[in-house]
Image (cartoon, rainbow, N blue to C red):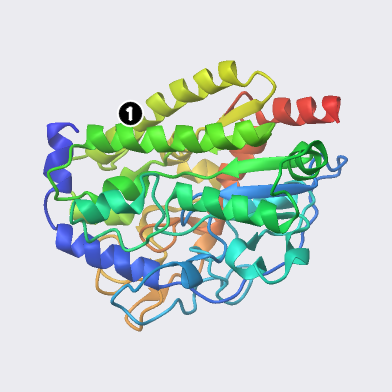
Amino acid sequence: MASSSVTYFSWKNTLIAITTICILSSSSCSASSATTKVNPRPRPFKKIYAFGDSFTDTGNTRSATGPSGFGHVSNPPYGTTFFHRPTNRYSDGRLVIDFIAESLSLPYLKPYRSIMSNATDAAHGVNFAVAGSTAIEHQFFVKNNLSLAITPQSIQTQLLWFDKFLESQGCKVAGAACKAAAFDDTLFWVGEIGVNDYAYTIGSSIPGDTIQQLGISRVTSFLQALLKKGAKYVVVQGLPLSGCLPLAMTLAPEDDRDGIGCVKSANNQTYSHNLVLQAKLQQLRTQFPHAVITYADYWNAYFTVMKNPNQYGFKESFKACCGTGDPYNFEVFAVCGTPSASACPSPSQYINWDGVHLTEAMYKVLTDMFLNGKATHPPFSYLLDMKLRHG
């Protein structure tokens, strides 16, 4: 980790711990299964399996996380824009994975924890993502006395859940028929995973380079496991432009800024992480030539919006829509969903929702860049063409 990153990450770690817990505790209870069909082309995939953290989680958090030390769950205004009620999504509405499902004419994914007793809900896929989840196994954080890590689930936990789910579908022994049913017509969407690993080591003596090495190693092993099982079409999101989140902007020194006004040290950290991740993905493409592995460039897509927010309909780039306090409408003791916080009247004009997560409007812009723009490598259209060509 660069020295400027140490400067940013080594102070006010107690406040960040409280914020992390508050945001994770501000989850809600139910998920929607409504479907919006927006793509007229023939449906290329019959199901989606999704993995990741709070940027992708559609309902696993409340039943999956351990004790947080705070008793409240998410309240309105979470979910107010589209679902008109909290749905355990960390936004005012839909997430990237929801828009992905819409574009493929599929229902919104049910969280794994909600379909364990009703397998019919999994006909079109399952979401295994958990808010607060890490790339590195939870025991690493426990061993190093890192109390920020309040969520015991990691990406390896999600892989275990996936294995259990396959067994519940009769795929304990991966025969040809099982593989065909589980993988041939399936899109694997691996949402960003790794930001929490860096956050949980704030203020500790563990170098950022160590977190990068361990985190990418775990994600690589996870992807190898999916590919060995038979995954053919995989999208992997990189880490976001985390230095532009109100949390980072609030806690970082004012002289730690980059050309777009965000926290330079944090953005440099995630940028560096993504470069190594992309190199690993290229190695996996060589190792598994039968698979299409697409990288979704979360960092540069976000950066593109930040350079010219008005072009995408945003009037506020830095303030959180839901929160309280100056200058970023964000306070660690009054996060969205608590009595002291309130929401802006027009979330669609904001990039940030609650100080840590994004608005539905921003997620839609990012999804459009992933599906139709230049933010996926190789392009998502190539992945679709390969699927339609091979059936």
**Residue carrying label 1:** 272
Residue type indicated by callout 1: Ser
Closer to the camera, 57 or 348?
Answer: 57
Q: Position of residue 35 (x, y in %)?
A: 77, 61
| Residue 118 relative to residue 24: left or right | right
Q: Tag 1's secondary structure?
A: helix
The quarter of the displayed image where residue 190 is located? top right
Q: Is residue 52 above or below residue 258?
A: below
| Residue 41 relative to residue 336: left or right | right
Q: Position of residue 199 (x, y in %)?
A: 27, 50
Closer to the camera, 106 or 333?
Answer: 106
Residue located at (72% from left, 67% from top) = 33
| Residue 228 relative to residue 101: left or right | left
| Residue 238 relative to residue 94: left or right | left
How busy is the neighbourhood of tag 1: few (under 14 within 10 Å), some, or many (20 plus)?
some
Q: Give the residue at the far front of this rendering.
A: 173
Q: Is residue 237 visible?
A: no
Q: Where is residue 286 in the image (x, y as percent from the top left)?
A: 57, 15
Q: Give the residue at the far top of this rendering.
A: 286
